Amino acid sequence: MDAFNKLNLKNQSSKFICIGLDTDIDKLPACLKDTKNPVLEFNKAIIEKCSGHAAAYKLNFAFYERGGYEGIKTMQETIAAIPDDILIIADAKRGDIGNTSLMYSEAILNNMNFDSVTVNPYMGYDSIAPFIKNPEKLIFILALTSNAGASDFEKQKLENGLCLYQLVIEKVNQWNINGNCGIVFGATKYEELCENMTRIGELPVLLPGVGVQGGSLEDVIKTFKKYRRRNFLVNVSRGIIYKSNGTDFADAALNEIVSLNESARLLLND
């Protein structure tokens, strides 16, 4: 099943929560500390408990690259534990000159077998092209991110009156000839999200920043409902995976994603 259909099937069944497996060995429950691979055991427990309710899993490369070869191996073993019908996103934020991007694309989407990847558009189309050439993969291109530093470049005004991130959204719509482009739009930027829903059009949207970073699930859901849009993912990382630091950590994660899904369902049907 291609990436777009994986997302679509989950969204149509009212599943919008992407679990961010930003697994930090320093934050794991004490009950896992003496296991052979605490990060992998933690991830597998979260996946086993939550897969019936997750729309996607997102793995942030930094948390695995930190561990060198063993960290990358853990990432691959984590991917293998995720059911085939669930979208797996590489949060890698790649983007470089064409040939380098081609190598990144082959590594992440082919060899590592991710369904999707986040990419940075600020070196232009040739840095994005190798990723979007495969119509079976879903490419999330950074538009407006959830961090405070988004104001440094992304929100700067251009001569034509657009902000840089708005130009990115327009470019992504132009590049979407294979129907496999989406954007990353920070849930903490609620006013900008409302103002740009028409500009976003039918692009799938990955929204980080709900929970610990201050983004509101209710605001996001109501905005997409207003525009009759259902192809989006709300990423929650720490708010799910670290809900408990005890032996019940996986059950606590399950309870949280069930609660988030129910809140989304009620908001959509309100």
Image (cartoon, rainbow, N blue to C red):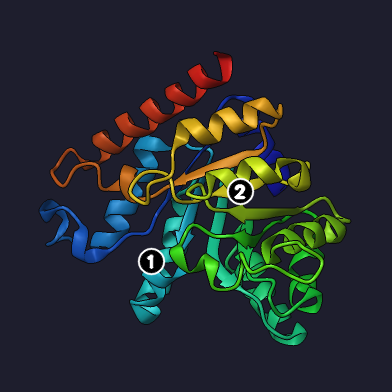
- Image x and y of residue 77, in percent: 43, 61
Q: Can you tell which quarter of the image residue 157 is in?
A: bottom right
Q: Can you tell which quarter of the image residue 122 is in?
A: bottom right
Residue 74 disc label: 1
Q: Nearer the viewer, residue 98 or 74?
A: 98
Kindly identify the residue that appears in the image at 61 percent across and 67 percent down.
154
Label 1 sits on what residue type?
Thr
Kindly identify the residue that appears in the image at 41 percent across and 72 percent down.
62
Kindly identify the residue that appears in the image at 34 percent across and 52 percent down.
43
Q: Is residue 231 left or right of residue 260?
A: right
Residue placed under numbered mark 2 in the picture: 192
Q: What quarter of the picture does the N terminus occupy?
A: top right
Asked if 74 appears above or below 50 in the picture, the reply is below
Helix, strand or loop under label 1: helix
Q: Considering only order in the chain, which callout, 2 or 1, is on the residue closer to the N terminus?
A: 1
Q: Can you tell which quarter of the image residue 45 is in?
A: top left
Q: Nearer the viewer, residue 57 or 16?
A: 16
Q: Return the residue found at the far top.
A: 270
Asked if 246 appears above or below 169 in the picture, the reply is above
Asked if 263 appears above or below 66 in the picture, the reply is above
